[in-house]
């Protein structure tokens, strides 16, 4: 599966995507991640990607042109016009394990990281195919949300976690809550592992 992420801050992804399961999934060829700086697709010497909203108002809004150029470059390069373009925004549908499973069935998705006061509405109307929120709160931008989506979806892909069906045992996959876990030593600061776990009959 391939993820292409459109962002103003590509360097934010370097640490998270180069460790643990996500790095192993890339090394094994289960996923590919492309990070695209929206500024690279803005015209002119200053590469302007945002400006005050038309008609006035506070804050800055991401311009349509650079976003369309970035997304269309990815789409044209893939040779397919059916790639979902997902905007990470507080107004989107609330991300869940079910949505992660839905996205895991796709071969390719584009994640657009919102910033500032939002994006030109024409991006929503004519480019974006879905909008996702990771919670009922406001973040500085969509980068963290994109990381969450990539992580959750990647875990559901075949062979990423090793054992067949390993992702099915996750608490939110099964709808069951796991019990408490313990490790050695058996006694830590006078607190013991419960007897039922020490008996060998658990």
Image (tube, rainbow, N blue to C red):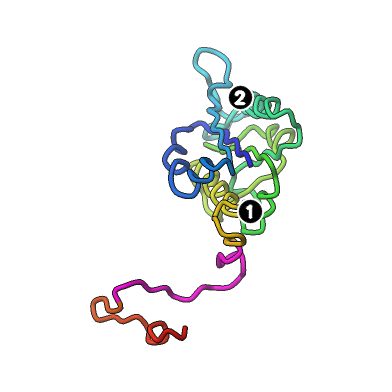
Q: Is residue 172 inside the magenta stretch? A: yes
The relative height of residue 30 versus residue 80 in the rendered view (above or below) is below
Judge by depth and name the residue closer to the eye, 64 or 3. 3
What is the number of the mark on residue 138?
none
Q: Which residue is mark 1?
A: 100
Residue pictured at 27% horizontal, 79% vertical: 187
Quadrant hosting residue 41:
top right
Q: Which residue is mark 2?
A: 66
Judge by depth and name the residue closer to the eye, 180 or 160. 160
Judge by depth and name the residue closer to the eye, 15 or 198. 198
Q: In the rendering, at what x and y percent does residue 172 appear?
A: 58, 65
The relative height of residue 58 versus residue 73 in the rendered view (above or below) is below
The residue furthest top is 45
The count of marks equals: 2
Quadrant hosting residue 190:
bottom left
Mark positioned earlier in the residue sequence (1 or 2): 2
The relative height of residue 180 versus residue 156 in the rendered view (above or below) is below
Residue pictured at 53% horizontal, 28% vertical: 37
Q: In the rendering, at what x and y percent does residue 29 appear?
A: 57, 40
| Secondary structure mostly taken by the magenta-highlighted segment of the chain | loop
Element at label 2: helix
Q: Residues within 10 Å of mark 2 (few under 14, many from 20)?
A: many
Label 1, label 2: how far apart the Cα atoms are: 28 Å
Q: In the rendering, at what x and y percent does residue 143 appear?
A: 51, 41
Q: In the rendering, at what x and y percent does residue 114 appear?
A: 57, 38
Q: State the extent of the magenta-drawn residues as a range.
A: 168-185
Quadrant hosting residue 125:
top right
Q: Residues within 10 Å of mark 1 (few under 14, many from 20)?
A: some
């Amino acid at each position: 599966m391939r993820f292409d992420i459109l962002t103003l801050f590509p360097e934010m992804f370097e640490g998270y995507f180069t460790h643990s399961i996500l790095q192993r999934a890339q090394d094994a060829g289960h996923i590919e991640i492309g990070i695209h700086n929206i500024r690279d697709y803005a015209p002119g010497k200053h590469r302007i990607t945002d400006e005050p909203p038309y008609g006035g108002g506070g804050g800055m809004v991401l311009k349509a042109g650079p976003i369309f150029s970035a997304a269309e470059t990815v789409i044209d390069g893939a040779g397919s016009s059916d790639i979902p373009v997902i905007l990470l925004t507080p107004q989107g549908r609330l991300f869940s394990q079910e949505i992660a499973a839905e996205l895991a069935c796709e071969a390719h998705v584009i994640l657009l990281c919102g910033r500032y006061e939002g994006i030109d509405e024409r991006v929503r109307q004519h480019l974006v195919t879905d909008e996702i929120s990771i919670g009922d709160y406001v973040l500085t931008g969509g980068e963290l949300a994109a990381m969450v989506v990539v992580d959750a979806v990647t875990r559901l892909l075949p062979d990423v976690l090793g054992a067949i069906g390993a992702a099915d045992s996750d608490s939110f996959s099964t709808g069951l809550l796991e019990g408490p876990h313990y490790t050695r030593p058996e006694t830590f600061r006078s607190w013991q592992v419960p007897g039922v776990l020490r008996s060998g009959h658990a």
